[in-house]
Image: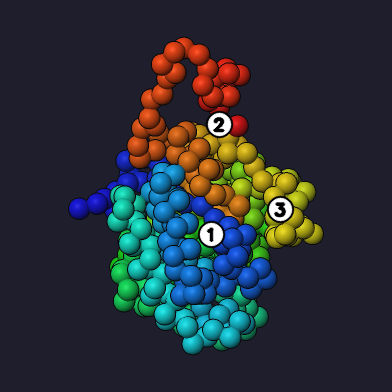
Amino acid sequence: MSKGILERLAEGPVLGDGGYLLELEKRGYVQAGPFTPEVVIEHPDALAQLHREFLRAGAEVLQTMTFYASDDKLATVGLAGKVDEINRDAVGIARKVAAEGDALVAGNLSLTWAYDPADPKSADHVRELFDRQLQDQLDAGPPDFWIGETFSFTAEALLFVERAKATGLPVMATMCFERLPARSYEGDTPGGSAKRLADAGADIVGVNCLNGPAQQLPIAVEMVEAVAGAVPVASQPVGYATTDTEADFTAWPDFPYGLTPKTLARGELAAFAADARDAGVRYIGSCCGSVAEHVRAMAKMLGKLPAEERAWKSPTGQAMSAYEYYAHTETEV
């Protein structure tokens, strides 16, 4: 039987997958703006192919394509009636591809945009949104564990932990931070958010999205220090070059259509993977803008590629490729 996420993390770092929404938008399967995941039921083969690319690149976890797959978000594009189908089918697609290797499937939930601290009723509404997604994915699988991500309110992340823990599966909850110094919308520091989530029962806590590696790693390190080994910490930065003054790539004026020139080289995410490992981060992944080449470079850095590359040599000693001709040697940058 394959080891679960907590067993794997106890043995060392686990490599997550990359970004789905923006990559599928580039390929014409997701609409920019709403970024809702109807690709699950409209083009399931396209989704399976991206899962497979991440698996072949060395990812040890495949997340279901269920970010924004809640009633409220799907209603914005007239698909509220497809909530159950999208959540169930997404698990099946990820599970089928994961079986081609030794990857785990993480049932993905996200911020809802429905939480309002000024409205006491909103918490129960968010619970209902989470419960429906959780039950749909349980019915279809279940997943191996849950990932709730991209929460700006610690309180909304706590609602996710509450509902996900009730299923009996391991729970990972990750915050996101729009600007530096990093704070949740309530004013929690990253360490404060991580401690609250761990105390509430989250099995893994962390940070994802919005920030590139240079801005996100210090946030993750603060979380590592705050939980002091009580739970593993996750970090999944975007594949773009954010800065201290523009730490949130979604706030850039050229989001999402002009992001390509700001894409990080694969070696920059490989270097992040090594730095995160050395800093005590245990779940090392990536988010929007990170594609198979980035995940593969991270896998190489962490020693997690699933197969050896084929040895090659010119039989005559004469160069037979430009790689040989110019005497290139492999670097990840």
Specify which label sits upstream in the sequence, 2 or 3. 3
Q: Is residue 211 left or right of residue 126?
A: right
In percent of width and height, residue 225 lies at 51, 43
Q: Amino acid at mark 2?
A: Glu
* Position of 8 relative to 322 (above/below): below
Residue 77, image quadrant: bottom right
Q: Residues within 10 Å of mark 2 (few under 14, many from 20)?
A: some
Above or below, 123 relative to 64: below
Q: Residue 63 shows which numbered tag?
A: none
Residue drawn 58% across the image and 78% down it? 73
Residue 240 rendering spot, x and y as whole percentages: 66, 48
- What kind of element bears circle 3? loop
The residue that label 1 is drawn on is 20
- Across and down, in percent, residue 208 comes to 56, 55
Element carrying mark 2: loop
The residue furthest right is 253
Residue ID for mark 2: 332
Q: CA distance from mark 2 to mark 1?
A: 22 Å
Q: Quadrant of residue 48?
A: bottom left
Q: Residue at x 59, y 68 (%)?
A: 30
Q: Are marks 2 and 3 in contact (CB under 8 Å)?
A: no
Mark 2–mark 3 distance (CA, rounded to whole Å): 21 Å
Image vertical order of residue 231 relative to residue 150, above or below = above
Q: Secondary structure beneath disc 1?
A: loop
Residue type at mark 3: give it. Leu
Of callouts 2 and 1, which one flags the residue occurring earlier in the amino acid sequence? 1
Mark linked to residue 259 = 3
Left or right: where 152 falls relative to 255: left
The colour scheme applied to this rendered structure is rainbow
Q: Is residue 50 visible?
A: yes
Disc 1 and disc 3: Cα gap in Å? 15 Å
Q: Earlier in the sequence, mark 1 or mark 3?
A: 1
